[in-house]
Amino acid sequence: MLIYECEQYSPEWWSARLGVPTASCFDKIVTTKGEPSKQAKNYLYQLAGERIAGAKVETYTNAAMQRGMELEAEARALFEIVKEVEVKKVGLVYFDDQKKFACSPDGLLQDSDLEIKCPLIHTHVSYLLGGTLPSDYFQQVQGSMLVMGFSLGWFLSYFPGLPPFIIEVHRDDKFCAALKVALDDFCEELDQVEAKLRGMA
C-alpha cells in the first residue's frame, strides 16, 4: 500500500481522489456476491468525466451526514479507550504506486484499519441488535482490507449515549479476489474511456 498523508476533506485530499475508484464506492462496481453492479457504468463515466474536467463531482451532504463527520473524532477516541490502542489518522491509501484505486480509512492500526459510522439513532440501534457488519458497508470494509493488504478490519458505529457497536471483520478472500479482478477490469476500461474523451477535445 502507498499512504498519501493529508487531511481528509482538504483540497489536497479531494485532488488525490480525483477520478480514482475508492472503497466507499466499491459497491458501485461489485455486489456483495462479487458480481457486477448495475451502477458500474454510471460510476465509470463519472470518474472519467472528473479526470477530463479536473474537478470532483459535487456530492450530496445532508444534516445527518454532516453530524456524522463531526462525531467521527469522538468515536475514534472512544475506540482507542475501549480497545486500548492508538489509531492513526491518514488521508488516502492507494493499493500500490500505480494509484489506480484507493481507500480513505477512518483510522489505521498496526495490522488493521477502522471504519467509523455515526448514523441516526434508529440505524445505530439496528446495528446493535443485528450484531453483524451491516451489508451496506460490506464492499467498503472488505475493499479497504484489499487495498491495504490487511486480513483484519474494525467497524464502529457510534451514537452518543448508547453503547458503541464494535465488530471485528475478517477478510473474505474469495470476495476480495473477485473484487481485485473487477477493479482491474474497471480501471482498464476507465483509462480507455478517458483516452477516448481526450481524443474528442
Image: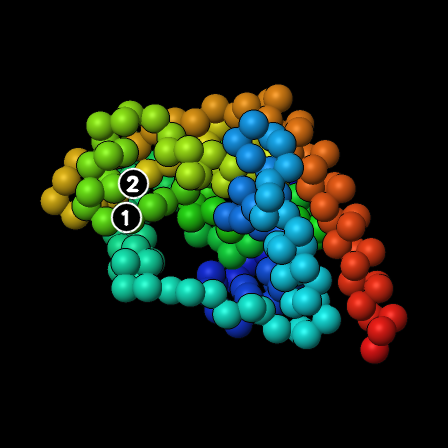
Is residue 157 among what the camera can see?
yes
In this picture, residue 192 sits left or right of residue 10: right
Name the residue tied to disc 1. Answer: 119
The residue at 68%/59% (across/down) is 45
In this picture, residue 200 sits left or right of residue 3: right
- As helix, strand or loop, the secondary structure at mark 2 comes to strand
- Label annotation for residue 157: 2
The residue at 28%/58% (across/down) is 64
**Distance (Cα) linking label 1 and label 2:** 7 Å
User: What is the residue that sits farthest to the front in this orientation?
Assistant: 38
Mark 1 and mark 2 residues within 8 Å of each other at the beta carbon? yes
Residue 67 location, x and y as percent? 27, 60
Q: Quadrant of the C terminus?
A: bottom right
The amino acid at mark 2 is Ser
The residue at 76%/42% (across/down) is 185
Q: Nearer the viewer, residue 199 or 19?
A: 199
In this picture, residue 2 sits left or right of residue 131: right
Is residue 78 among what the camera can see?
no
**Of circles 1 and 2, which is in front?**
1
Residue 144 location, x and y as percent? 54, 40
- Above or below residue 200? Residue 170 is above
Label 1 neighbour load within 10 Å: few <14, some 14-19, many 20+: some
- Label annotation for residue 179: none
The amino acid at mark 1 is Pro
- Above or below residue 93? Residue 32 is above
